[in-house]
């Protein structure tokens, strides 16, 4: 599948990759770099909806791949449609992302824009994919039928350090639909998740239910949360949460979509 992905890019005038630094976009970027050399450009949004640590990780990943990396500033909090947090919030976010990516593509006279959507994404609630399709953004992993498991395998074949990197969704995905997205909430979520990371928990989410924090971790990490509950509660309360809960169902992607 690695060679098929590389071949997908051959014959293109170049490629601009919407690049988050996650395993999907890293694999796409590595294949584009292999096929197109300097005509492959990775583009990352510096956004308030993603932790600063993720931006630094994206910079490091781009250097590892050896691909030219452009960064632009995006502020979704200036978009009323996004701030209202409707069920298609990701659609409005992606519209803004694509505007920034397209502006950079035009500067390099490159017409092909790609993302890291893969074949495992199609069964989920993904309004952002609609925005990408409307903007004629290509998804080579999806087109080639490459699933998440295969993406991680290809990442290993490329020798990428992100092979086992946990999935990372934007911080706004921790806020229930219909509740306004604010910079304060995003900062509180980021700080709360950093507290859990400090305990050695890498795959988790802190869901923001106003005064209540709902912690999702993998089943094997639940004992770690219980063992450190006193300091977690103390630190979360210092952030402004009145109640701190552990979701016994555990971590799962898109848990806020369960009410849809």
Image (cartoon, rainbow, N blue to C red):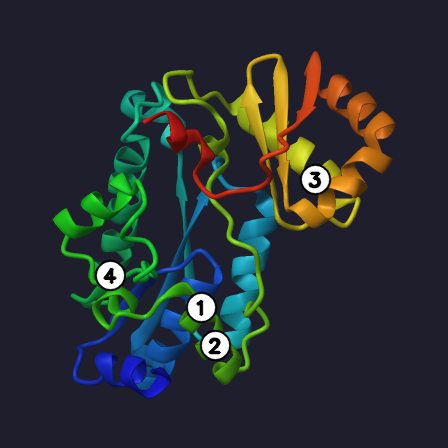
Asked if residue 76 lies left or right of residue 158, the reply is left
Q: Which residue is disc 4 drawn over?
A: 105
Q: Which mark is residue 10?
A: none
Distance CA(mark 4)–CA(mark 3): 34 Å
- Is residue 21 shown to the viewer in this render? yes
Residue 134, percent across and down?
A: 13, 47
Q: Which mark is residue 194?
A: 3
First of labels 4, 3 by sequence position: 4
The residue mark sitting in front, 3 or 1, is 1
Mark 2 touching mark 3, by CB under 8 A? no
Distance CA(mark 4)–CA(mark 1): 30 Å
- Quarter location, residue 188: top right
First of labels 2, 3 by sequence position: 2
Q: Which mark is residue 153?
A: 2
Distance CA(mark 1)–CA(mark 2): 6 Å
- Quarter location, residue 78: top left
Of residues 134 and 55, the one nearer the viewer is: 134
Task: Name the secondary structure under disc 4.
Answer: helix
Q: Is residue 217 positioned above or below 19 on the image?
A: above
Q: Which residue is disc 1 drawn over?
A: 149
The residue mark sitting in front, 4 or 3, is 3
Distance CA(mark 3)–CA(mark 1): 27 Å
- Is residue 66 shown to the viewer in this render? no
Residue 142, percent across and down?
A: 26, 64
Residue under the image location 32 percent in, 54 percent down:
121
């Amino acid at each position: 599948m690695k060679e098929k992905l590389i071949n997908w890019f051959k014959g293109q005038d170049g490629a601009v990759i919407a690049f988050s630094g996650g395993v999907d976009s890293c694999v796409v970027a590595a294949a584009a770099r292999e096929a197109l050399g300097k005509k492959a450009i990775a583009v990352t949004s510096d956004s308030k909806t993603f932790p600063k640590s993720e931006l630094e990780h994206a910079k490091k990943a781009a250097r590892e791949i050896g691909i030219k990396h452009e960064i632009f500033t995006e502020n979704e909090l200036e978009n009323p449609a996004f701030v209202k947090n409707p069920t298609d919030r990701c659609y409005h976010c992606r519209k803004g992302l694509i505007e920034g990516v397209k502006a950079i593509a035009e500067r390099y006279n490159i017409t092909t824009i790609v993302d890291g959507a893969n074949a495992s994404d199609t069964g989920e609630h993904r309004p952002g994919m609609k925005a990408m399709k409307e903007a004629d953004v290509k998804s080579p992993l999806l087109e080639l039928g490459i699933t998440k498991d295969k993406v991680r395998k290809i990442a290993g074949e490329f020798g990428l350090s992100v092979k086992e990197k946990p999935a990372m969704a934007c911080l706004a995905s921790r806020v229930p639909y219909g509740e306004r997205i604010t910079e304060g909430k995003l900062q509180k979520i980021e700080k709360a998740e950093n507290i859990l990371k400090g305990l050695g928990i890498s795959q988790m989410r802190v869901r923001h239910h106003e005064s209540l924090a709902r912690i999702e971790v993998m089943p094997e990490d639940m004992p770690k949360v219980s063992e450190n509950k006193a300091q977690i509660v103390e630190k979360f309360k210092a952030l402004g949460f009145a109640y701190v809960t552990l979701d016994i169902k555990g971590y799962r992607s898109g848990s806020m979509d369960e009410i849809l």
